[in-house]
Image (cartoon, rainbow, N blue to C red):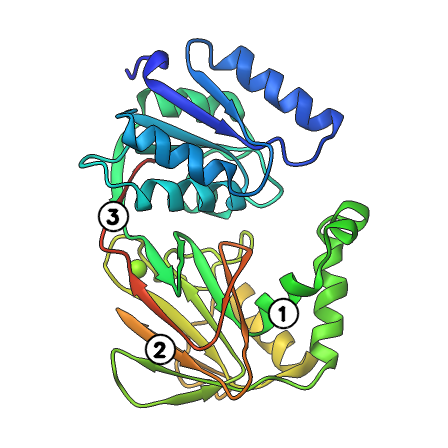
Amino acid sequence: MRPADSIAIIINPAARSVRATQQVEKVRAMAQGATLLLTQAAGDARRLARDLAHSGCPVVVAAGGDGTVNEVVAGLLESTAPTPPTLGLLPLGTMNVFALELGLPVRQLDACWHHILSGPTREIDAWQAGNHPFVQMAGVGLDANVIQLTSWQSKKKWGPLSYVLSLARVLDQPAGQLRLSVDHGPWLDGTTALFGNGRFYGGPFPVFPNARPDDGLIDILLVHGHGPATFCKLLADVLTRSTDDHQESVTRLQGRHVRIEAPAPVPCEIDGELGDHSPLVITRHDRRLRVIA
Ligand SMILES: [Mg+2]
């Protein structure tokens, strides 16, 4: 058992809503003895995680969605602490793909807390897209364009549907072109490149059914086409868990070092948040992450 007073919880009360307040109160009641730290603005979770690492805190819990996890991970990775804290998760966000990947009971907060107190740990790879670390996914092209186009107001008004509305707009525009090179190999052309540290991408969708977050390799899906037809084919492949390498619309690859270039800058998303633009390099972080999972 890990004593609750050895655990610090970084909680992101996403929107200033009644629901967010209720979530904070629920966590406070459940996690008695633990230190609760509330974020107020973007960047807070990262700074708090880094400070906790430097102060020798053994367990840091990211309470929020994938965006909060990404910030906490970034803070842990950039600390110079010889033994960075172990990461725990309390999935509270709209998107909890990383928690899903780790097999956590994402809809049962009490069970997740119990797991933080007594669950086993494992080491996983962390990756870097340009200057931004990620633990679950990154994408250059279509999905980053969708995220870029989806405003906070639209998310608040339409929920997950806001992404579908943005997707329809992106698919209607001409495709951007990019090219990538894996482990200094030949250049391959495409319109979108998706990167997976684990199986799930953008939700409970096993885009990378064979990916392992601890094998030192990033799984890559390079999409060649664009438009609704390509997207529907891609979606069908994902839903039927097809990993046929000989489809003409996609190329599947694995590697340690990926270079991406494009004639015009293409946006990149990391764990569902906007990151850098192309050109950029995706490489394994020199530190691994210890997680309770
Ligand atoms: Mg891997």
**Numbered tag placed on residue 288 in the rendering:** 3
**Numbered tag placed on residue 259 in the rendering:** 2
Q: Quadrant of ligand 1?
A: bottom left
Q: Between residues 255 and 204, which one lies in front from this camera angle?
A: 255
Q: Secondary structure at mark 1?
A: helix
Looking at marks 3 and 2 on the same chain, the residue that comes earlier in the sequence is marked by 2
Q: Position of residue 118 (x, y in %)?
A: 31, 21
Q: Residue at x 65, y 64 (%)?
A: 148
- The answer to whether marks 3 and 2 mark residues whose Cβ atoms lie closer than 8 Å is no
Q: In this picture, is 282 found above or below 98?
A: below
Q: Looking at numbered disc 2 in the image, what kind of residue is underneath it?
A: Arg
Q: In this picture, is 250 found above or below 148?
A: below
Q: Quadrant of the C terminus?
A: top left
Q: In this picture, is 14 found above or below 113?
A: below
Is residue 190 visible in this depiction of the protein?
Answer: yes
Q: Residue at x 32, y 17 (%)?
A: 6
Q: Quadrant of the N terminus?
A: top left
Q: Is residue 111 left or right of residue 53?
A: right
Q: For the residues marked 1 and 3, what is the alpha-carbon distance in whole angstroms?
A: 29 Å
Is residue 102 visible in this depiction of the protein?
Answer: no
- The answer to whether marks 1 and 3 mark residues whose Cβ atoms lie closer than 8 Å is no
Q: In this picture, is 109 found above or below 14?
A: above
Q: Residue at x 28, y 31 (%)?
A: 54
Q: Residue at x 51, y 37 (%)?
A: 44
Q: Position of residue 155 (x, y in %)?
A: 74, 50
Q: Looking at numbered disc 1 in the image, what kind of residue is underneath it?
A: Asn
**Numbered tag placed on residue 30 in the rendering:** none
Q: Between residues 145 and 57, which one lies in front from this camera angle?
A: 57
Residue indicated by mark 1: 145
